[in-house]
Image: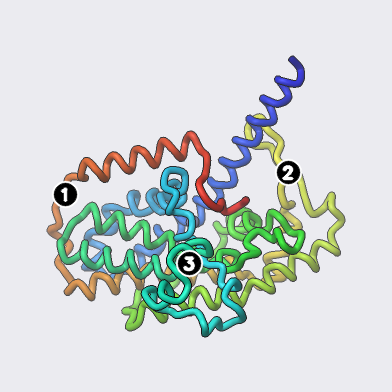
Amino acid sequence: MKKTLIAAIAALSFIAIATIVLAWGFWVHQRINRVAIFTLPPQMLALYKPNIEYITSHSVDPDKRRYSNPHEAPRHYIDLDRYGKSPFDSLPRRWDEAVAKYSQDSLNAHGIVPWYVQLILYRLTEAFKQKDKYKILHYSADIGHYIADAHVPLHCTKNYNGQLTNQVGIHGFWESRIPELFGEDYDYFIGKAEYIEDPSDFIWKIVLESFSQVDSVLLMEKELSVQFPADNKYSFEQRGEISVRTYSREFSAAYQRKLNDMQERKMRHAIISVGSFWYTAWINAGKPDLSDVTDSPVSANDQEELEAMDKAWRDGKIQGRAHDE
Ligand SMILES: [Zn+2]
């Protein structure tokens, strides 16, 4: 009896922690999509501003979709270090050439984010051409998520959660805990969206830069851990009924300082990149007038998919790699 009770409580705590971890990641995606709207020219704001809540809340759909769609997980990352040494010249930047060289299965196994961003850019451009309101908003929210993920160093390495260097937990620490603690004070004044001449080159530069920061992300945490006794590195925080062990505020602040505010710099770059991708799709579609796009009914298929995604996410067993595994 007692054992069952303990097991039940343990299971409940696990669910609560998992939800909290996701919710922290959610905060960053929502903030990036939301602020990106303010980088747009007035002709685009005519559509984006009245739909700011949609663009914000649906920024996390791709993460929710990982619960309902087994193909979703690899779209969020790329393990570049599976392909030799930086700058990974042997890895073709073009999708068809990469498939010919490595096969689609093997590319999927190591993540496909830079290619997937380009696919969604194409779909978004088509949606602008058709002036299809639902699709414009849907793909805008989606591409914002994938571009943001490409900015996270630990989304670009096979050691994505420090599991190869005895630093398990660092993924959520870097991308969720730090911005959740300090993100309200970041400077989000970022300027105007710019036209991207070569989207492939642009997104590849982003993942290569993210990869180049993996070493510091890991090393700084290691160095700091030596200076912090374990009971200062971690602290317990009350989340509802449950006490959760997490990285302490002091350790988090020290890590952010040592990384020279990397999370803030990366969030700022993600925001301007998201705005610039939206802007580029609109320009390439011939700058359609967005002031008169009317509400298009969501198709039965799309509606069904949305509901299935939400249900699977609430019931929650993730398919493929989780961010915080
Ligand atoms: Zn993601």
Q: Nearer the viewer, residue 230 or 179?
A: 230
Q: Is residue 85 visible?
A: yes
The location of residue 135, given as percent across then percent down, is 24, 55
Q: Is residue 156 left or right of residue 232?
A: left
Residue in view at x 29 percent, y 57 percent? 49
Q: Which is nearer the N-term, disc 2 or disc 1? A: 2
Quarter-of-image position of residue 175: bottom right
Q: Which is nearer the N-term, disc 3 or disc 1? A: 3
Residue in view at x 79 percent, y 65 percent? 224
Task: Name the element at disc 1.
Answer: loop
Residue in view at x 46 percent, y 68 percent? 270
Above or below — where is 9 with respect to 54? above
Callout 1 crowding tier (Cα within 10 Å): few <14, some 14–19, many ≥20: few
The location of residue 256, given as percent across then percent down, is 67, 65
Residue in view at x 63 percent, y 58 percent? 171
- Amino acid type, residue under disc 2 in the picture: Arg
Please give the residue where the numbered disc 2 appears in the rendered image. 245
Quarter-of-image position of residue 209: bottom right
Q: Which is nearer the N-term, disc 3 or disc 2? A: 3
Mark on residue 296? 1
Task: Name the element at disc 3.
Answer: helix
Say if disc 2 is inside 8 Å of ligand 1: no
Mark on residue 107? 3
Mark on residue 43? none
Task: Name the element at disc 2.
Answer: strand
Mark 3 → mark 1, Cα distance in angstroms = 36 Å
Q: Please tell me whether mark 3 or mark 1 is closer to you in this view.
A: 3
- Amino acid type, residue under disc 3 in the picture: Leu
Q: Is residue 303 left or right of residue 33?
A: left
Quadrant position of the N terminus in the picture: top right
Mark 2 → mark 1, Cα distance in angstroms = 46 Å
Mark 3 → mark 2, Cα distance in angstroms = 36 Å
